[in-house]
Image (tube, rainbow, N blue to C red):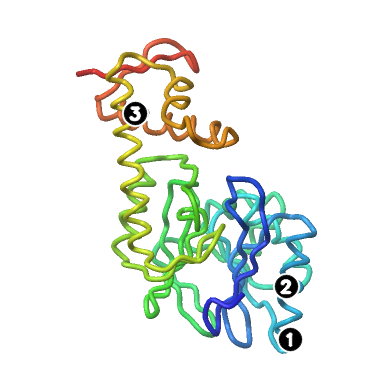
C-alpha cells in the first residue's frame, strides 16, 4: 500500500491484540529503498516483503534497513533481508547489542538520539524514545511531518510500557514535534498524529486516576486492580495490563503517593495520604 509516492507499507495481518491488525514494514525511497523494520522471522513476513519488492520492479532495491527497536517482530527479518539484499543496517546501540545474537554487531551503524538517517527521498531525524523498550527510536521527516513510531505509538489501541516515566517523557517529546502522519509498527497509518499522541498522554493520566480511585476503596493487589479497571477488555490483554498497572504503581510509589505491603505478587497497594 502507498502512503506517499516514495513510501510504501507492507502490512502483514496479525491476530494477536499485542500486534493490532498488522505488523508493518515500510519501504522508503525512489531508486534505492530504505526498509524500516523487518517483521518476524517467519516465511509469511519475508514472502509479503518479497511480493512488494517484485511489484515495485527490479530497478529498485533495498540498500538500507533500519529497525525501530529490538523486539523480534521488528528485527526478526534482518537475517533474511541481509541474505537477500545485503543492505546497510541501522539501529539504536541498545538494539544492536540485542540483535547481535543473530546479526553481527559490526554490520550495524548505530543511530543515537540526534543523528540522521538519509534515504534517497527523505531525511529522517532520529529521536530516542525509551518506554516501550529502552532501545526504541522514532524517525521523523520534518519537512513533511511524517513520524515512524515503531511500537511507541500503535495504529490502534495502546502499547505495552516497560518504563512509564521514560514513556511519558517520550510521548511529550513526540508531541512537541507536532507530527501530521504517523506510520506505526502495527495497525493503520494515522493522520493528525499530534492529536493521537495527546490522546495517549490523556489515556495514561486517566489510568493513573482510575488506579488512585480504586485504591481509595482500600488496599488492593495488582490482580484485583486489573480485574476492576480492565473488566471490559480482552482477557488476553490482562497479562500486559498487569505490567502496565505495575508501572503506574511503581511511578506512584516513587512519587510517595502509594506504598506497598507484602511480598511479590501478593503485595497490596494503598494510598499514603
Ligand atoms: Zn511490535
Q: Are marks 1 and 3 in contact (CB under 8 Å)?
A: no
Task: List the residue tagged with mark 2.
Answer: 86
Q: Residue at x 58, y 61 (%)?
A: 67
Instruction: Give the foreground label among 1 and 3.
Output: 3
Q: Is residue 34 visible?
A: no
Mark 3 and mark 2 lie on one chain; the one further toward the N terminus is: 2
- Measured Cα–Cα span from mark 3 to mark 2: 49 Å
Q: Distance from label 2 to label 1 (Cα)? A: 18 Å
Disc 2, SS: loop
Report which residue position mark 1 lands on: 57
Give the residue pinned by disc 3. Answer: 211
Task: Answer few, some or many: residues within 10 Å of disc 2's Cα (few below 14, many 20 plus, some between 14 and 19).
Answer: some
N-terminal label among 2 and 1:
1
> Between residues 83 and 213, which one lies in front from this camera angle?
213
**Left or right of 236 in this view: 190:** left
Q: Percent from the top left, x then y, of residue 38?
A: 65, 62
195 over 65 or under it: above or below: above
Secondary structure at badge 1 equals: loop
Residue 198 image point, x, y percent: 32, 55
Residue 13: image location, x then y, percent = 67, 58
Give the image quarter of residue 34: bottom right
Q: Residue at x 60, y 62 (%)?
A: 24
Residue at the extreme front = 232
The mark nearer the N terminus, 1 or 3, is: 1
Amino acid at each position: 500500500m502507498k502512503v506517499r509516492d516514495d513510501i510504501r507499507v507492507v502490512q502483514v495481518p496479525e491476530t494477536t491484540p499485542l500486534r493490532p491488525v498488522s505488523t508493518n514494514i515500510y519501504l522508503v525511497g525512489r531508486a534505492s529503498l530504505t526498509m524500516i523494520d523487518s517483521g518476524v522471522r517467519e516465511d509469511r513476513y519475508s514472502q509479503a516483503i518479497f511480493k512488494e519488492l517484485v511489484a515495485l520492479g527490479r530497478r529498485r532495491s533495498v540498500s538500507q534497513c533500519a529497525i525501530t527497536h529490538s523486539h523480534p517482530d521488528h528485527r526478526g527479518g534482518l537475517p533474511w533481508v541481509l541474505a537477500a539484499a545485503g543492505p546497510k543496517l541501522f539501529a539504536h546501540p541498545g538494539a544492536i547489542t540485542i540483535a547481535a545474537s543473530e546479526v553481527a554487531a559490526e554490520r550495524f551503524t548505530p543511530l543515537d538520539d540526534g543523528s540522521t538517517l538519509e534515504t534517497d527521498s527523505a531525511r529522517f531525524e532520529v529521536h530516542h524514545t525509551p518506554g516501550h523498550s529502552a532501545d526504541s527510536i522514532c524517525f521523523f521527516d520534518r519537512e513533511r511531518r511524517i513520524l515512524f513510531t515503531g511500537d511507541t505509538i500503535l495504529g490502534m489501541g495502546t502499547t505495552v510500557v516497560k518504563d512509564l516515566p521514560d514513556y511519558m517523557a517520550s510521548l511529550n517529546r513526540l508531541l512537541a514535534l507536532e507530527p501530521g502522519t504517523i506510520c506505526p509498527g502495527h495497525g493503520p497509518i494515522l493522520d493528525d498524529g499530534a492529536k493521537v499522541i495527546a490522546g495517549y498522554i490523556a489515556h495514561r493520566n486517566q489510568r493513573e486516576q482510575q488506579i488512585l480511585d480504586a485504591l481509595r476503596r482500600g488496599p488492593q493487589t495488582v490482580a484485583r486492580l486489573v480485574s476492576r479497571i480492565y473488566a471490559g477488555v480482552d482477557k488476553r490483554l490482562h497479562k500486559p495490563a498487569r505490567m502496565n498497572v505495575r508501572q503506574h504503581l511503581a511511578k506512584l510509589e516513587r512519587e510517595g503517593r502509594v506504598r506497598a505491603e507484602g511480598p511479590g505478587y501478593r503485595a497490596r497497594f494503598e494510598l499514603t495520604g
